[in-house]
């Protein structure tokens, strides 16, 4: 299939491009490079020994998106493009709603106009709000604690309503949890611009000495050790989950959790990283972060049953691959 990947130069998008190409699909990427790097797509080509098509554009630009659909016979779309930081969304709610919702509407409208019925949407576990763990797809969604989560919830509703109006649509809403790690080659991984918003790249930057210490946001949550508990999933497991969803899509709307099904606290992640890599991570306890909840982890039985997919890589592999990428990334930066 010819698959359009929005945000394909980003962290999750680039790893999914690798999995798509390795599965025999053709890939067209659009990305505005706001929080990504064109060099990443060159590495995707290097890893797979296959080519892809790239357009630098914003997913909210309706005319530009329409032209891509005119240029290619597209069989399906995987929509990653969007702002993604929980904390930042609390400070910049209007930017998050504008970018994340408009891009979803523009892309869905283009699919409808051009007869593209297969859509995989990058949703998030944040749509569950502060529900009781483990989160399961049949839960009623509670109000989320941040605009990022709300933008994902509303996007899910937009796609669901579009599918009711266009019964040919086959849509997968993938609610995934906390992606970490990197491709085992170390060539691609998570390399955010500026100060990382996510835990693992901050940990790896502390490990290499770029940052003095890790801030742990709160140690008074009702969890195993007081720190926030999350379901960490290796980015390559997540990428393979997108391919499984794409290839198994049938008409209607299908919701899947993509996670490991296990909760890991911040302290447990720090200790796993230290043990896997032989590196000490200094940290400081600071106040809780706006928009965070105590615990989030998945019931993943539906994806296993219907897609034949489950996460295979454990937390130590995630830590090992994340650090391997960070070390390679440092070497490439110095070489320039």
Image: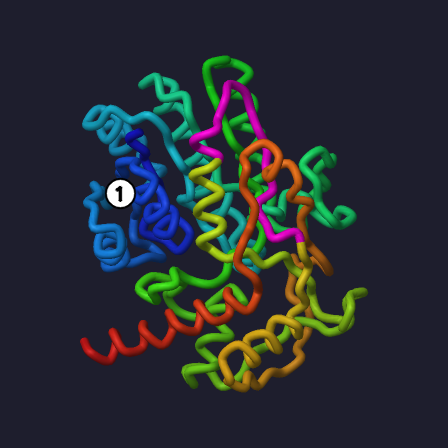
Magenta-span inclusion, residue 331: no
**Of 106 and 55, the residue lying toward us:** 55
Residue 264 lies, in percent from the top left, at 66, 64
Against 320, residue 32 (above or below) is above
Residue reaching furthest to the right = 222
Instruction: Say above or below: 232 vs 251.
Output: below
Question: If the image is split into quadrants, where does the N terminus sit?
Answer: top left
Classify residue 173 by image quadrant: top right
Query: Where residue 2 sits: x, y (%)?
Result: 28, 31
Q: What residue is shown at x 46% (from left), y 40% (from top)?
A: 242
Residue stretch in magenta:
245-261
* Residue picked out by circle 1: 57
The residue positioned 27% from the left and 78% from the top of the image is 331
Quadrant location, the C terminus = bottom left
Find residue 44 and report its horizontal and vertical position in percent: 27, 53
Any magenta on residue 255?
Answer: yes
Depth check: give the residue in front, 171 or 239: 239
Q: Quadrant of residue 127?
A: top right
Residue at 28% across / 42% down in the picture?
29
């Amino acid at each position: 299939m010819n698959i359009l990947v929005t945000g394909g130069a980003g962290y999750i998008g680039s790893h999914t491009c690798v999995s798509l190409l390795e599965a025999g699909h053709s890939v067209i990427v659009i990305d505005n490079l706001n929080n990504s790097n064109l060099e990443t797509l060159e590495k995707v080509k290097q890893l797979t020994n296959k080519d892809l098509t790239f357009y630098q554009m914003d997913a909210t630009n309706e005319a530009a998106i329409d032209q891509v659909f005119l240029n290619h016979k597209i069989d399906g779309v995987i929509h990653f493009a969007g702002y993604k930081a929980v904390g930042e969304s609390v400070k910049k709610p209007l930017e998050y709603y504008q970018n994340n919702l408009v891009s979803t509407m523009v892309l869905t409208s283009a699919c409808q106009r051009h007869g593209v019925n297969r859509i995989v949407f990058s949703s998030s576990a944040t749509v569950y709000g502060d529900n009781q763990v483990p989160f399961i797809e049949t839960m009623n969604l509670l109000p989320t604690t941040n605009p990022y989560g709300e933008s994902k919830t509303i996007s899910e509703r937009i796609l669901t309503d579009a599918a009711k109006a266009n019964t040919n649509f086959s849509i997968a809403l993938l609610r995934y949890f906390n992606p970490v790690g990197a491709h085992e080659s170390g060539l691609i991984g998570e390399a955010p611009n500026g100060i990382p918003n996510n835990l693992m790249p901050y940990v790896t930057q502390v490990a290499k000495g770029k940052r003095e210490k890790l801030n742990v946001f709160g140690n008074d949550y009702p969890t195993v050790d007081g720190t926030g508990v999350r379901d960490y999933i290796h980015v390559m497991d997540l990428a393979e989950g997108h391919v499984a969803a794409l290839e198994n899509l049938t008409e209607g709307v299908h919701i899947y959790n993509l996670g490991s099904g296990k909760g890991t606290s911040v302290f447990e992640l720090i200790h796993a990283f230290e043990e896997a890599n032989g590196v000490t991570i200094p940290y400081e306890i600071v106040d809780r972060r706006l928009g965070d909840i105590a615990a989030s982890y998945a019931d993943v039985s539906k994806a296993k049953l219907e897609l034949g997919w489950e996460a295979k890589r454990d937390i130590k592999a995630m830590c090992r691959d994340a650090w391997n990428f960070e070390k390679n990334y440092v070497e490439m930066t110095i070489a320039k």
